[in-house]
């Protein structure tokens, strides 16, 4: 697999840390002392205010009601732009995918609030139904379709599975990033295998006019760590603890507001749990293995 050039990421993390935070010492109606007057909320994989409003407007309203604090949506320009925004105090809370979480963790040192665990969030690796490939080790020298660079379930985790099977990601297989066209490429014989997320698989088949009988799943990975809500490390620990407690206690309402948007159906049936940072080490490991550890 060709190494990806992540040097452009470093340009995103040059923001300074000298501006003040808009706190109030007055108690809010619903949340305790040291609470801010308002919070700015960003989502790492939603670009632009219109999409952010469409996909997270209902969640913003629900969270605002639960915390008793005004919440403003803050659009980002790309999936990693939340890190400098946190550092420069332009944003207070970020909802990040697992890969983006470790970048935020390394660059902006936010405090994890909670993660949303998805019961069917695994990486799967498929071959054509008539393929003689039955084991991951047999993918040595082969070409594998993945979704996009940095995707947890469709790039990072499948690469970890291949590493665990004894393959070197730099020399033993070729990766091509095809977004959701990996299934089509596999069916046409343009690639030898396809890696995707288990909770995305059937939707891709339907949208691409494919059927399950076209493919054979040769490996399903373990449950993957969930997307994470993080907060600026400038907040008082008591405020973050209170916010965490309220979000967990009212998770039914919050998750219902999330899945009211078509784009967030993957969270249906999910649950809020405490964040265990060690669960994300496999992502860090893969970036090290593919020679991109420095940007973390």
Image (cartoon, rainbow, N blue to C red):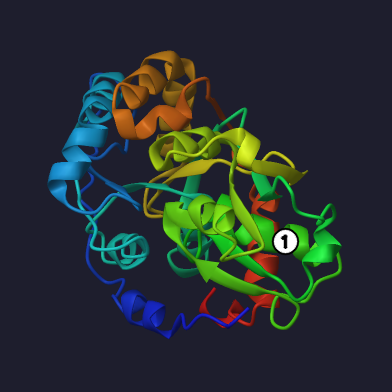
For this view, does 135 lie left or right of residue 276? right
In the image, residue 291 lies at what x, y percent?
63, 82
In front here: 222 or 86?
Answer: 222
Vertical order, 72 against 155 (above or below):
above
Q: Is residue 198 visible?
A: yes
In front here: 48 or 137?
Answer: 137
Residue in the picture at 52% in, 20% down: 269
Vertical order, 193 against 250 (above or below):
below
**Residue farthest to the left, as pictured:** 50
Quadrant in the picture for the C terminus? bottom right
In front here: 265 or 15?
Answer: 265
In the image, residue 59 lies at what x, y percent?
28, 27
Q: Is residue 126 visible?
A: no
Residue in the picture at 39% in, 38% down: 207
Label 1 packing within 10 angstroms: few (<14), some (14-19), many (20+)? many
In the image, residue 69 lies at what x, y percent?
22, 29
For this view, does 163 lie left or right of residue 1? right
In the image, residue 205 lies at what x, y percent?
49, 38
Q: SS class of the residue under badge 1?
A: helix
In front here: 263 or 287?
Answer: 263
Q: Which of the 4 image quarters holds residue 137?
A: bottom right
Q: Give the number of callouts.
A: 1
Quadrant in the picture for the N terminus? bottom right
Q: Which residue is mark 1?
A: 160
For this view, does 46 lie left or right of residue 109? left
Residue in the picture at 81% in, 57% down: 133
Residue in the picture at 37% in, 82% down: 8
């Amino acid at each position: 697999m060709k190494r990806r050039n992540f040097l452009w990421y470093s340009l995103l993390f040059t923001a300074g840390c000298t501006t003040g935070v808009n706190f109030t010492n007055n108690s809010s109606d619903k949340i305790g002392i040291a609470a801010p007057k308002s919070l700015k909320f960003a989502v790492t994989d939603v670009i632009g205010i219109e999409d952010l409003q469409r996909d997270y407007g209902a969640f913003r309203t629900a969270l605002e009601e639960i915390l008793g604090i005004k919440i403003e949506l803050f659009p980002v320009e790309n999936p990693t732009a939340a890190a400098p925004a946190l550092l420069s105090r332009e944003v207070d809370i970020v909802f990040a995918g697992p890969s983006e979480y470790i970048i935020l963790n390394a660059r902006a040192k936010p405090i994890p609030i909670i993660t949303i665990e998805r019961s069917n969030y695994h990486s799967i690796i498929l071959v054509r139904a008539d393929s003689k490939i039955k084991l991951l080790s047999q993918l040595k020298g082969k070409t594998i379709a993945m979704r996009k660079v940095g995707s947890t379930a469709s790039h990072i985790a499948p690469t970890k599975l291949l590493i665990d099977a004894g393959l070197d990601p730099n020399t033993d297989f070729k990766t091509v990033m095809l977004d959701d066209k990996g299934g089509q490429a596999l069916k046409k014989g343009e690639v030898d295998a396809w890696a995707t997320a288990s909770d995305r698989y059937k939707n891709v088949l339907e949208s691409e006019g494919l059927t399950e009988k076209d493919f054979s799943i040769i490996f399903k990975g373990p449950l993957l760590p969930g997307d994470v809500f993080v907060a600026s490390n400038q907040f008082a620990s008591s405020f973050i603890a209170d916010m965490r407690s309220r979000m967990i206690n009212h998770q039914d309402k919050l998750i219902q507001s999330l899945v009211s948007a078509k784009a967030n159906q993957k969270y249906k049936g999910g649950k809020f749990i405490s964040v265990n940072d060690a669960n994300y080490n496999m992502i860090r490991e893969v970036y090290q293995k593919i020679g991109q550890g420095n940007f973390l």
